[in-house]
Amino acid sequence: MSQRNLVIRVAFLMVACALALALWVGPRSDPAFRMVVLDVGQGDAILLQTPDGSDVLVDGGPDGRVVERLSEYLPPSDRTLELVVLTHPDADHVGGLPAVAEHFKIERVLETAVRSDSLADRSWEAAIDAQRAQRLEAIGNYRLDVGGVALKVLWPPTAVAADAKLRNDTSVVLHVQYGETDVLLTGDISADVEQRLVLTGTLPDVEVLKVPHHGSISSSSEEFLDALKPAAAVISVGQDNRYGHPHPVVLRRYNKRGAKMLRTDEDGDVVMTSDGQKITFDN
């Protein structure tokens, strides 16, 4: 091969690599908000990506597979999560977060004071202490803006003790708003908490509802759904799980209201994109 041809080939490869790198590591240029309900089995892990390129992870699923799922949406050059929200420290929500902390820099953590005595929760505590992440307490009406996406805590209304019982009902309920798009993330709250939220009279109509407690019969009450009027409902649930989630009665409640149903056990990762007015699903 002549020296001239060699130079041309090397130059071509360098340009091709530069273009590929730009496409992979460059910031997202479209002014859009994306939510990905990750398929992590029987648990919750939800990635929020803001128009400015910030990344928020809500819960970490039951185990380390969340890291693999995140890598589908975050390039190798982006190993920072601007915020991690832990709704409550049950194993199917906190289990994967220690692995997340091993692979990503975490800037801020939003959670309640509730703790469990599980190895996963203890490992998570140690990991965020080691990273010196800023810790924020989730309490009613706490507001946070991340890259133009507004986050508001609707539940719990007051501070919760570390040894609180019924951890499901201490779940952080998060109202996510981008333009005219409203999303409600509900952790594992029961119908009791749903009723208390309805009584506040402050629940928004939502385009997308993350179905509480994986579609358990103990949640998704009629009154709650009537107050929210969700256009779409996403169930994060494991295939053939031993709990029988989602319950057929719960599915009928959503179907009766004409909500678009999406499930991670059937659809895999559920990807929603919003330009602030219109939402679309990749599924």
Image (tube, rainbow, N blue to C red):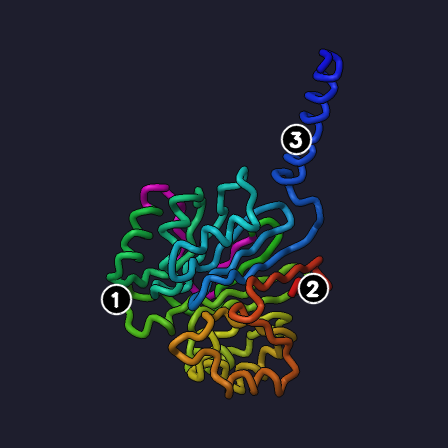
Task: Specify whether residue 137 is painted magenta.
Answer: yes
Amino acid under disc 2: Thr
Task: Specify whether residue 75 is painted magenta.
Answer: no
Q: Return the disc, 3 or 2, that comes first in the chain's sequence.
A: 3
Q: Is residue 196 visible?
A: no
Question: Considering depth in this image, is 57 or 77 the residue closer to the camera?
Answer: 77
Q: Position of residue 28 (x, y in %)?
A: 66, 45
Span shown in magenta: 129-145
Look at mark 3 in the image and give the residue it sits on. 17
Q: Is residue 231 visible?
A: yes
Task: Estimate the spatial distance between the alpha carbons at disc 3 and disc 2, rounded to whole Å.
Answer: 32 Å
Question: Considering depth in this image, is 134 or 82 the residue closer to the camera?
Answer: 82
Residue 163: which disc?
1
- Position of the C terminus, as image quadrant, is bottom right
Identify the residue at image location x=61%, y=51%: 50
Q: Return the disc, 1 or 2, that comes first in the chain's sequence.
A: 1
Disc 3, SS: helix
Q: Residue 241 occupies which quadrant of the picture? A: bottom left
